[in-house]
Image (spheres, helix red, strand yellow):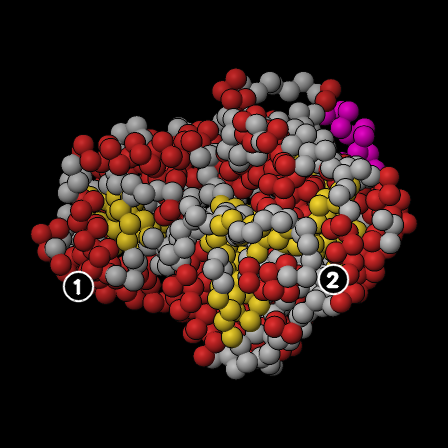
Amino acid sequence: MTLNDLLTAENVAQYLPLSGHLPSIPGRIINVTHQIPYNIIRSPPTMTPIDNYETHTQQQEEQQQPEPSEQTTKNNPPTPPYSPYNSSFESTTDEEERESIDLFKKMHQHSYQKRSTSASTTTSYPSGAPISKVARHHRRQGTLRVKFHAADWTVVQGRGHGALYAGLQSLSQHWETIHIGWTGPIRVSQSHSKNNNTNNSNGNNTKTTISSESIELKDKQKLEGLLWETGRIVPIFLDDKVSNGHYDGYCKEVLWPLFHYLVWTNATDGRNEKQYWEDYVFVNQQFANTIISHYKKGDIICIQDYHLLLVPEMVRAQIPDAAIGIFIHATFPSSEIFRCLAARNEILKGMASADLVGFQTYSYARHFISSCTRVLGYESTLVGVNANAHQVSVGTFPIGIDIDRVNRFRKQPGVQPKMDAIRSMYTDKKIIIGRDKLDQTKGVLQKLRAFEQFLHDYPEWRNQVVLIQVTTPTTSGNYRLLETKVSELVSQINGMYGSLEFTPVHHYHQDIDRDEYYALLSAADVGLITSVRDGMNTTSFEFIICQHEERHSPLILSEFTGTAGSLSAALMVNPWDSVGVAKAIKEALVMTPEEKLTRHMQLYNHVTAHTASFWAQSFVKQLVSSTEKRSLQSHATPALDLNLLLDTFKKSKKRLMFFDYDGTLTPIVSVPSDARPSKEMLKYLQTLCDDPQNEVWVISGRDQQTLDDWLGSTINNIGFSAEHGCFLKAANATQWTNMLDDVNMNWKHDVTEIFEYYTERTQGSFIEFKKSSITWHYRMADAEYGAFQAKECQNHLENALVSKLPIEILIGKKNIEVRPASINKGEIVKRILAQHANADFIICAGDDKTDEDMFRTLSTARLAHTNSLYSITVGPAEKKTMANWHVKTSHDLIHVLGQMASMK
């Protein structure tokens, strides 16, 4: 079967990441997240003891309980999966529904009467929500969060990372899945645990946490059984010290700031960072061990986010053929920032051990590839990175949200009254809303400064617009300092532009409940998001869904958010440009209904099409596609079986022979002009060429004149290909065939300029010009500095030219070559194979990256499954290659030639 037979429309379609059908997976999908999608609570001892677990469960099932209503069943969220045996919808109000604190007492008394201009004034109003002031006299009929009970354990669906868990859960509709993750802090009532750390950040929390070490083995087994029945969940138990060092230490104090361009400014002695790193490695190894213990042949492994960057390499070490993908939900910095990380090599090698690395945006993917080339010296490819012959696909997969879940939430009975209350409080006013975590990356200060600029530049809008800003408290970074700055700026704006009747900025520094949140999004006239660095801001998606039925209000979005590349119909702003943001606010406020609807429908169509389910399935589909191409990837090879080769050679009738020159027929030398052929090699080649059953080709990177002078003038009946397939000269031909007649070579000038730049700065380097390519050699430069400059040069070429011009970069031995992308040695081999379909013995030998094109072509032609193909690489046994045999040196290959020549 030829390559053309394989490249049918049907076969090609299955490799397209977004084609219609779903791939077949022989095993399961192992989803791996830092934490499972449930909160675990240990119940008081007054509940049924663990020892009576089975009896208690049976009694629960036999009790006469009212069936859940049809509406409640419909509202059952798809994330995560649950077992109908032990699940129940609780009628008690969630913790998030507890009474909130009213920050603005004056606003509750009368609309637009005397108010305090200070945004930090706090007065307690337990009967009303902080923004809408709607009293909570009702109780929900049932929470939309799933709870499960079994003996001493209660498992409650978590509230965070809804898009991630929704996407992962959607996979279970098509494939069998399991979910591996840390349990998270296990909480227990104070009456059940006397000597545990109290988690009392809200002042009224009645639960404490219990360390996983204090839980007996039989209790852990019961909890594991409940989680497995609940949603095929495999929990990982971590002791408090290690989990804190991993998450609060390395993840939050080292990786997260760096990934968000917050380079550390405080110098330390490094002891804490060293301990954090050790905890990070330990936790990653725990995850890897759990994956390995549950892995079955045919499974694919999907790892999520920056908490587990070392896991792919750890799993690969034990399961070399595992299908592994890792998706980074956070931003990924440029190589200049990433190089500041002390463990940069370990982190990149861990990620590059996956088959597929996914990011939210193209720029993050490009930064990762650039870091691999600059830090590790890996070669970039058309689809990702070549990590020492392991092909790593790098893709962009923007995450979405669970549309059904958002629609359920925004249509809850408590939302509409709060919407009406908010609109009535600000009658004839335009409402701008913002909801962010209070950290440096969310751009809250930039938003306030831009709103202040808006009120300054457009005085006609004073007393006509209010900004309602909700900031969720955090504990990371310089939280207190940032909180103070925000409060001071709010007070400054209200003091400058407010009055006794009007307060332009209403700042709520607290959590708000879900109904209040969706009411705020639905009632807004403008959504304003000014993040200075954000992975994927799903608030923008929820805003678009909430605006669909009535208002179609415009969205102002920072160009530095991960969603900016997808939501092109939003008003894009640079949050550092206060004047530009102010102008965008004005544009949004005066936008015509027709333009609002047009922009909104474009945004809405994207959000509803690119859901969390779409994201998860696209990632899995691409991962399956990447692993299906493994037969075309490199592998370690055995030493050449010379006796087997000679036996096959002797029995064959028609033989094809392809040989590289430098490093194959002759050893690599410091000065290319010194690599002249030996008399022994010339003698053996001539003997082989004299046999009419043989067709011998030398396929080299050398130019035409060199091949003619060194080989053509001495050997008769031999074919040549010069400059990596750019020129062809068949045996006994007098003229060379130019394969570049229809190829654009205008790129040479740009490449030459870059090579000259690095030649001037790298003593001992030089440029070699050929008709079809340009090569920068640094074998005579200082070894360490030359390698460093080569990485810089490669990165420069890839960023400046490769994405724009039809060229490719070849990383050779102490050189970098640039050539046309459509011409290579593999194309020449394919051309010659087509002319000699009856060949029953093929030998192909080479030593470097350019020769892998020949090996790959032969493998693609499915000749690798027969005994007639001997593709031989020159190098060590552990070298990753597409060849199926190896010899250690070029002298060994010359010996093989001599043995074949002696059998004539």
| Front in this rendered view, residue 229 or 591 | 591
Q: Main secondary structure of the magenta part?
A: helix
Give the image location of residue 705, x and y in percent: 55, 63
User: In x, y percent, where is residue 894?
Assistant: 79, 61
Q: Front-most of 256 and 827?
A: 827
Please indicate whether residue 455 sits to the left or right of residue 636 in the image. Answer: left
- Residue at 52 percent of width and 17 percent of height: 70
**Left or right: 877 as drawn, with respect to 587:** right
Label 1 crowd bin: few (<14), some (14–19), many (20+), radius 10 Å = some
- Whether 47 is among the magenta residues is yes
Q: Note whether residue 542 is visible.
A: yes
Queried whether the magenta region covers residue 97, the answer comes back as no
In the displayed structure, would residue 269 be above or below residue 111? below
Residue that carries the numbered disc 1 in the rendered image: 496
Q: Is residue 26 above or below residue 816?
A: above
**Range of magenta residues:** 45-60
Q: Secondary structure at mark 2?
A: helix
* Separation of marks 1 and 2 at Cα, in angstroms: 90 Å
Precedes in sequence: disc 1 or disc 2 = 1
